[in-house]
Image (tube, rainbow, N blue to C red):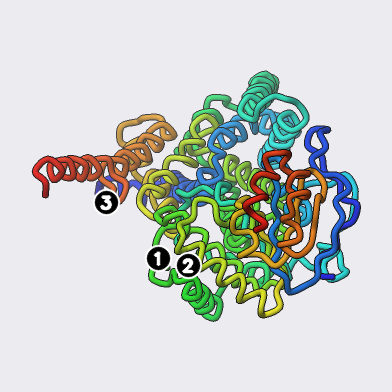
Amino acid sequence: MSGFLADVLDYGFLQKAMFTSVIVGIICGVIGCFIVLRGMSLMGDAISHAVLPGVAISYMLGVNYFYGAVVAGVLTSVGIGFVSEKSRIKNDSAIGIIFSAFFALGIILMAKAASSVDLTSILFGNVLAVRSADMWTTLAIGVIVLITVTMFYKELLVTTFDPTLAAAFGLPNRLIHYAVMVLLTLVTVASLRTVGIILVVAMLITPASTAYLLTDRLPVMIGLSALFGALSSLIGLYISFNYNLSSGAVIVLAATALFLLALFFSPKQGLLWRSVRTSRNRKAAYTGD
Amino acid sequence: MALAVNDLRVSYDGKEVLRDVHFSAPSGRLTGIIGPNGAGKSTLMKAVLGLLAIDRGTVRFDGKPLKKMRHRIAYVPQRSSIDWDFPINVRDTVLLGSYPSLGLIRRPGRPEKEEALQSLRKVGMEEYATRQIGRLSGGQQQRVFLARALLQHADHLFLDEPFVGVDAASEDVIIGLLKELRDAGKSIYVVHHDLSKAVAYFDDLLLLNGEVVAYGPAKEVLRPEHLGQAYGAFGSLIAGGESR
């Protein structure tokens, strides 16, 4: 561990990697709470895959991949909304159709894009290859996401908890849905370098779900989720650096390990305590206590 | 007139649910909206509140369109529409009622929190303030939602089936509070399906079956000929016991 810390101090690339992955862990954790509570996990998976053609086109045009990704993400969520509203196709099928089409298009476009672009690093991330520009993009996105969530926390809470009440308040549910989609796209873009397109959904869902098992209050859930996201990133980075493993995969497995701990040992919802309680109650019932 | 509905028509997927709905409700009344299953009771409430698209017709609150009156209106939806595992406790649920008056960005502060607790006291739920919302009984949940509506200080209060799955004690608390609000001059509309208590609970009734069958003082609406028209032959049988 101390060797790792010394390396962090010595190597600029490692500092960038650490800084970027912690920010990614935090913002994925925050947005992930709303994705999980809105029941949009599949949508999160879809949007993250669907940014690929946008990234490819950005490379072709020589602009920051941020712009293309946002356009592709928004087009996808609009497309999914259109198919599920205007036809009898159910929402989950609409999601499957649209995002796999975008992803497929992205694979072809990536092959056509400049040869310097490495499809694998976009798909799976490579945190040790984070450049300064990526770090600043991630930081800027992080600031935007956190400010937006803080400013519109009330509106996000009420539209997530009770959309009917939100509509009665006169809140634009649909607009807020698309705003969440845009935030989701931004977070995906920020995560490209660290965990990659394929696994970013885990960073959105897993830390948020871990937090969900531990608390009954949304502000606490958001805080814990951000903490678990950042912690997973740090653990993942450490292991991936020391054992030369794929960073995105290790970060996701670290998040999963935290989730499993909560699943079994959470004081409120943990499966272990639940089974202890059940068997105690059963015993009490048998002995007539 | 507190609420004036004119020539309202609503349809789902091309199927007409409400037609020619026309009534004017004076303010300061406790009104029950009754009718058989599928009569369009909840649909009428949602249409009036702008929660679904209407084919045609107008709705006016105190002579003004909904858009200008939203802050004067509180709505308690059916309990079934909510995720009961949501990480929110009783006090924070009530606090949602302060959101419309806070506008964008501003968060509820100490006065709002204090008032939320007062609202909870009024419905007898103060001791549950930190309880997660799903760990309450149906009646307790409904009382919490009423407390939230109180926080909105609305002149027009709409409740959709507030007594479904609710224990008798909670039902008494809720109807008592609604009558208090009515006495304070508020206009209250309740979608309700239990005819047996309709006269005891409500000043006026709106009997609905796709269209307005009858509207007026509760006793007059519950006449056999009206109920027969709304519920069929079976309805006039119930009405035999009802109107006496």
The kind of residue on which mark 1 rests is Thr
Residue A267 image label:
3
Which comes sooner in the sequence, label 2 or label 1? 2
- CA distance separating discs 2 and 1: 6 Å
Provide residue A116's location: percent of width, then percent of height.
Answer: 62, 27
Q: Nearer the viewer, residue B20 or A140?
A: B20
**Which image quarter: residue A151?**
bottom right
Residue A87 vertical placement versus A139 (above, below): above
Which residue in the structure is indicated by mark 1?
B130
Q: Circle 2: is it few (<14), some (14-19), or many (20+) Cα within 10 Å? A: many
Marker disc for residue A100: none
Using the image, determine if residue A284 lies above or below residue A104. Answer: below
B145 sits to left or right of B232:
left
The picture places residue B12, in percent across and down from the top left corner, at 78, 37
Say whether residue B101 is visible.
yes
Disc sitting over residue B91 in the figure = 2
Residue at the image point whose x is 30% and y is 32% from the top: A243
Asked if residue A64 shows in the view, the reply is no
